[in-house]
Image: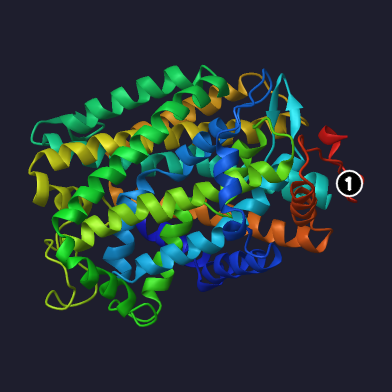
Amino acid sequence: MQDIVATINQYVWSEALIYLCLGAGLFFSILTRFAQVRHFKEMLRLLFSNKESDRGISSFQALSVSLSGRVGTGNIAGVAAAIGFGGPSAVFWMWVVAFLGASTAYVESTLGQIYKEEDEGQFRGGPAYYIEKAMGQKWYAWIFAIATIIAVGALLPGVQSNSIGNAAELAFGGDSTVNFFGDSISLTKMVTAVVVVGILGFIIFGGVKRIAHFTQVIVPFMALGYILMALGVVIYHIADLPHIFGLIMKDIFTPMAGFGAAIGWGVKRGVYSNEAGQGTGPHAAAAAEVDHPAQQGLVQAFSVYVDTLFVCSATAFMILITQQYYVTGVAADISGGMAAVDVSANSPAFTQMALQTVVGASGEIFVAIALFFFAFTTLLAYYYIAETNVAYIRRSIRFPGELTILKIVLMTSVFYGTVRSADLAWALGDIGVGLMAWLNIIGILILFFMGSPAIKALKDYEQQKDAGVEKYTFDPEALGIRNADFWK
């Protein structure tokens, strides 16, 4: 199974996808005249627009839901893997893909808003919706919807829960074991799996409103707490900070692990973490109650900054400044780190060891708790994304109990991922991320050449902003945007 998954991954995550992600980000950055920089102040203003209704959630809630998907195990275990397989310079490429990806996030999230629908009393939208309406290719929209349901409903949840289980085992021990279908599983992992699945079931059976209200409280709290802890570690080793910057910049084109490894792993884990271009962000963006689609596009662009430039950087600096890492494929004396080579780079171990050097054993417990909240809120976002795509398919084909089946499959994946090996979970997750990225990025590039609705929306918003209007409006027909029925 491991070999089969690895072979599939080689094709999905070929160099073509890596450069497609970077190229699309640069392309849309130029087209939007680097809106991710020009409108940074406007992003902050829009964050605190509390326009919520019975049908839609506020911009801040939409940001929290999307951030709950972006800020997850990729920010802790994923950064460790990028450094472990690509060297310290992989961090630089995570920054690059975040900066450029912010423009991609703007485009896809604005499209999600433009082509959203009202479905059974709530807003729905995402790539499947805008591919069908803007491109007119329903078959392509169905492929994306099915691929997304499989990815976020079955493949990716195991990655998040696996990191929760590994962190809990490292923090609380795994000596006691139980027999599980012939395998010996640590009691800590088994208890963790039961607790996570139980809480997850309670929330996802409560609908998108319960998810939004839960994440708007938890996400800002957990991200700020984690960044402050990382800042404390960096201050403790402040004298080494210039050396760490030099280490990151030293091998950005010729990394220690071989030419291209830093770029490949930096982009792969960057896209996995911030999800720019992957097509997940537009689902939460479409659920927001806003006056103009571009507003939510800008808010979602900011969420990429929060994810990678803040949270991922916090993890990277903790690991590098305490030297609790190693780079696979190079000799121990030149890898730069001090971590034991038997520690899995696909786990949160590097981060836990980094904190342990400063605050002792409590560091492992802190990372385990932080990872629980990071990964758990991501699981909530995954369910919402899967539910939205089930709702899309349900417009054409209805069958009884489809959402109940989805919930059971996702909860089963979470349980299985918690007690299984990290490498297989990450490999399956990479396939899910890669398939969605291929389908979505190609889709939004085609849509640019078919009328560029997201770029038109940005220009319209900027004109109204420059005119000093008190209330923004959006008229798609006046802009030559077809099939945006919600806004008519």
Evaluate whether residue 455 shows in this view: yes
Residue 284, picture quadrant: top right
Rendered view: 59 above or below 457 = above
Q: Residue furthest front?
A: 468
Q: Residue 249: percent from the left, percent from the top?
A: 33, 75
Q: Residue 353: percent from the left, percent from the top?
A: 14, 51
Q: In this view, does 420 lie to the left or right of 295?
A: left
Q: In this view, does 421 lie to the left or right of 100?
A: left
Number of numbered discs overlaid on the protein picture: 1
Q: Residue at x 60, y 32 (%)?
A: 49
Evaluate whether residue 348 shows in this view: no
Q: Residue 246: percent from the left, percent from the top?
A: 27, 75
The colour scheme is rainbow
- Residue 457 versus residue 483: which sits nearer the camera? 457
Determine which residue is flagged by label 1.
482
- Residue 126 versus residue 102: which sits nearer the camera? 102
Q: Residue 87: percent from the left, percent from the top?
A: 29, 70
- Residue 127 versus residue 75: which sits nearer the camera? 75
**Quadrant into which the C terminus falls:** top right
Tell me if mark 1 has few (under 14), some (14-19) or many (20+) residues whose alpha carbon lies within 10 angstroms of its own: some
Q: Residue at x 36, y 65 (%)?
A: 91
Residue 335, picture quadrant: bottom left
Q: In this view, does 134 lie to the left or right of 210?
A: right
Q: Which amino acid does label 1 sit on?
A: Arg
- Residue 45 versus residue 396: which sits nearer the camera? 45
Q: In this view, does 471 lie to the left or right of 241?
A: right
Q: Which residue is drawn at 34% across and 35% down?
A: 222
Q: Residue at x 47, y 66 (%)?
A: 96
Rendered view: 395 above or below 346 = above
Secondary-structure class at tag 1: loop
Residue 35, picture quadrant: bottom right
Rendered view: 421 above or below 117 = below
